[in-house]
Amino acid sequence: MEFIDPELLSYCEAHTSEEDTLLKKIVRETQAKVLMPRMLSGHLQGKFLELLVKMHRPQTILEIGTYTGYSAVCMARGLGKNGKLITLDKNDELEHMVRGFFKESGLAKQIDYRLGNALDLIPLLEGDFDFAFIDADKKNNAAYYDLILDRIPSGGLILVDNVLWSGKILIDKEQKIDKDTVAILEFNRKVAEDPRVETCLLPIRDGLMLIRKR
């Protein structure tokens, strides 16, 4: 399901700062070599992430779901020189490709790339996170949220991807829904009703939930 007319999307992208050579390379190699390239953040969302980080100026970012590294590179570019991005992913088959992109970005020293199950890795991480981006398996969105919210300071941000789930969240009574859709519906409701945060659900690509800790 498209949430914006393709021509309007093209217009938005044409009036968004252009992707550079590295980002175009990540897109090209992801589409050519990796399954489900639609999972890649892409031009519009990537620049939104970069600008949001530049405006918020976090010291430490946690990303759950690295995929091929596009979003990590965009966010790392928004960090100050002493900032750090920790990015977690369970797919070790992409490690060589991803580390290569991070090296090309010139930001590898600021990117802490860890492989494994995020539910196991997060409790092992030290310190708090000023900014978090959740873009992994949808059934665990609520678990990730619960693990990190107490480690986000007041005023800190959490961004969650795919919360519109190709429009599947707009169900009717006769529709049979899958487990991922159920999980996303429950997560969206959970966050909307959480008095500890304020939220805004943005129809960017497949839906971004912007959450600010009160």
Image (cartoon, rainbow, N blue to C red):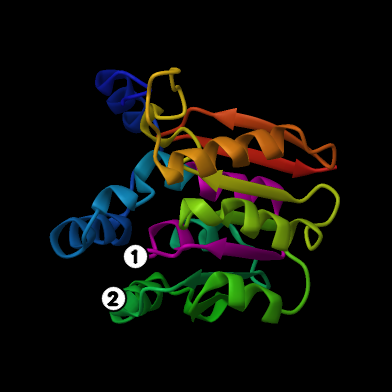
Give residue 17's mark: none
Vertical arrangement, residue 183 with respect to residue 57, above or below: above
Q: Secondary structure at mark 1?
A: loop
Q: Position of residue 97 (x, y in %)?
A: 28, 75
Left/right of residue 27 with respect to residue 49 in the rendered view? left
166 or 214, which is in the foreground? 166
Give residue 3's quadrant in the image.
Answer: top left
Left/right of residue 212 with respect to residue 75 in the rendered view? right
Name the residue rendered at 76%, 51% in the picture.
156
For badge 2, the amino acid type reads Met
143 or 29, which is in the foreground? 143
First of labels 1, 2 by sequence position: 1
Give residue 120's quadrant in the image.
Answer: bottom right
User: Few, some or many C-alpha atoms within 10 Å of disc 1 (few <14, some 14-19, many ≥20)?
Assistant: many
Q: Contact, CB < 8 Å: mark 1 with mark 2?
A: yes
Which residue matches tag 1? 68
209 or 17, which is in the foreground? 209
Q: Position of residue 114 (x, y in %)?
A: 50, 79
Q: Is residue 58 visible?
A: no
Name the residue rendered at 44%, 56% in the picture.
71
Vertical arrangement, residue 208 with respect to residue 19, above or below: above
67 or 180, which is in the foreground? 180
Vertical arrangement, residue 200 with respect to residue 36, above or below: above
For badge 1, the amino acid type reads Thr
Give the residues drawn in magenta, as a range. Answer: 48-72
